Image (tube, rainbow, N blue to C red):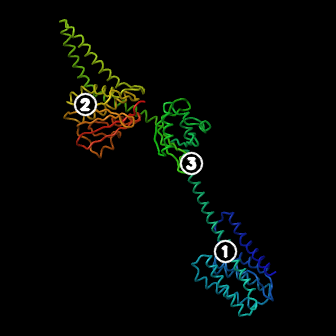
Amino acid sequence: MILLDYIVNLAIFSLLVSAPLVIFSYTRHKPFKQVRLWGAVYAGMVSILLVILSFQQQGYSYDIRYAPIILIFAYLGPIAGIITGLFSVTARLMTSGNWYPVVIGWVSLMTGFSVIHFYIKRLSAVKKSFVLFSSYIVIYGMIIYTFKIFIDNPIFHLQYLLFVMLGVIIGALLIESYMKLHRLNNRLIDMYQMVEASEAKYRLIAENTSDLILVLDKEQSISYFSPSHEIVLGYTSYELKKVELCQFVHPEDVGVFRHTIETMFENKESQSMEFRVKHSDGHWIDFESRCMPVRGENDSIENIVIISRDISERKQAEEILLRSEKLSIVGELAAGVAHEIRNPLTTIKGFMQLYKRGDSSIDDLLLSELARIENITSQLLTLGKPQAVHLERSNLLELIKGTLELLAPEALMSNIQFKLNFEEDSYFITCEKNQLKQVFLNILKNAMEAMKEGGEIQISLRRGDKDECIILVQDQGCGIPEELLPRLGEPFYTLKEKGTGLGLMISNKIIKQHHGTITFNSNGQEGTKVEIKLPSAS
């Protein structure tokens, strides 16, 4: 029966300790005021209940009421512990006799616990509980020996101390578990609030930015798109959801778009591209996009984030700059063309005077010179007037020869010779001929202007290792300081006194649109070398 009483006491004690902890775990409560006082009062009430459930042994009451007292001393300090002890000793004195040893034992324990707590206050609550229980064993033994209480039955006392120890261990485990879970719960709540706040910020940015943000999955279907798509493209969310993006991309850009996306899934590297997307009313919008792969499990690419910007207005501005630069070049070429036209006209005039003499060879000369005039004026008009962009398969060598012929008069006046070197007769590429002529004119005129004393400009054409055509232009001019090379191509940055800086900027843009590259090399002493790479036509 004694063992059963202890088990009942222990079960009731465990229930009373865990009940408030379970209740608090379901609430996001703030630490309430006077927590030590209310904790001591609750522990005192638990002690009273344990005293009521105690069993009598020859006039003495036995229970585990000192388990909550030890825990309160360990977790809330001496003042709270003494308050709990007052509840406990009052209930004990009211329920049974033998007051003297009870009072002496209570005073000894309260005094001992208070003194010991002063020395162990820096320890954790669990370690405090162990030390206080150890001191309880010592003081309990002293009381038993002093008042000769069941000295002939040590098993009885060991059993009692064992259940008090179990009460302390169970109570400490429940409290520590609650505190750990409470801290973890608070941390999770804080993290959840941070995630919500962060998500709200990103949602605010995504929903109010003018840029278009979308996420593609492995099947190249749209899994997310920002609301700006509806504003810029005019489609509803229902039309965009779960639709393959290529359905809206311009047919001429679909191949490049698919290739770029597939390359990112394979190489796991960010890419930039330009493509046209169809508006709901039928017109096309130019977009510049930055594509970033998102890694998932096993370092594989799960999604691709595409951030796009409408560059239609910028394209129009670049077109205006291109036309302006063309007009500038046409004006500069006018003097050379006029000089070149004057020479065949002089020849025609002279032979017209001799025509009356009946020399039959004069007809051939006249036709040759007239054809020359016609060719020069035709190239000048083609360069000057606006042309629609029309990509076609062209021989790069013929384009360069035509450009050199156009610049020949000015080169002759400046004592400059062009030397063209090539390995083959055919270098076919897919291009817009007028735009590439614009590039070659810009590069060659810059080379000519850098050679004040005249000289030779080397132009070489060869095939590269990656199925590409490489054009090298080497002049004998003053060169460009190495530290200034990175700035070439910036708008309105020029080394010429009356230059605009737009020529190289437009050239860079044209080469980029043809999926090529252009680089500049110079050491400031041996002239400047320009290398242009363009993909060969299949």
Residue 222 in the image: x percent, y percent? 57, 40
Task: Give the image quarter of residue 432.
Answer: top left
* Residue in the image at 63% along x and 68% along y: 180
Depth check: 526 or 153 in front? Answer: 153
Residue labelled with disc 1: 172
Residue labelled with disc 3: 203
**Marking on residue 464:** none
Disc 1, SS: helix
User: What is the crowding at mark 3: few (fewer than 14 residues within 10 Å), some, or many (at least 20)?
Assistant: few
Three-letter code for the amino acid on which mark 3 is drawn: Arg
In the depicted structure, whether residue 51 falls above or below residue 335: below
**Marking on residue 419:** 2
Nearer the observer: mark 2 or 3; the answer is 2
Disc 2, SS: strand
User: What is the crowding at mark 1: few (fewer than 14 residues within 10 Å), some, or many (at least 20)?
Assistant: many
Depth check: 33 or 408 in front? Answer: 408
Three-letter code for the amino acid on which mark 1 is drawn: Ala
Nearer the observer: mark 1 or 2; the answer is 2
Q: Nearer the N terminus, badge 2 or badge 3?
A: 3
Distance from Cα at disc 1 to Cα at disc 2: 94 Å
Left or right of 135? Residue 366 is left
Distance from Cα at disc 3 to Cα at disc 1: 45 Å
Residue 294 in the image: x percent, y percent? 52, 47
* Residue in the image at 43% along x and 32% along y: 316
Question: Mark 1 and 2 residues: CB-CB less than 8 Å, in contact?
Answer: no
In the depicted structure, whether residue 395 falls above or below residue 362: below
Q: Nearer the N terminus, badge 1 or badge 2?
A: 1
Task: Give the image quarter of residue 155.
Answer: bottom right
Nearer the observer: mark 3 or 1; the answer is 1
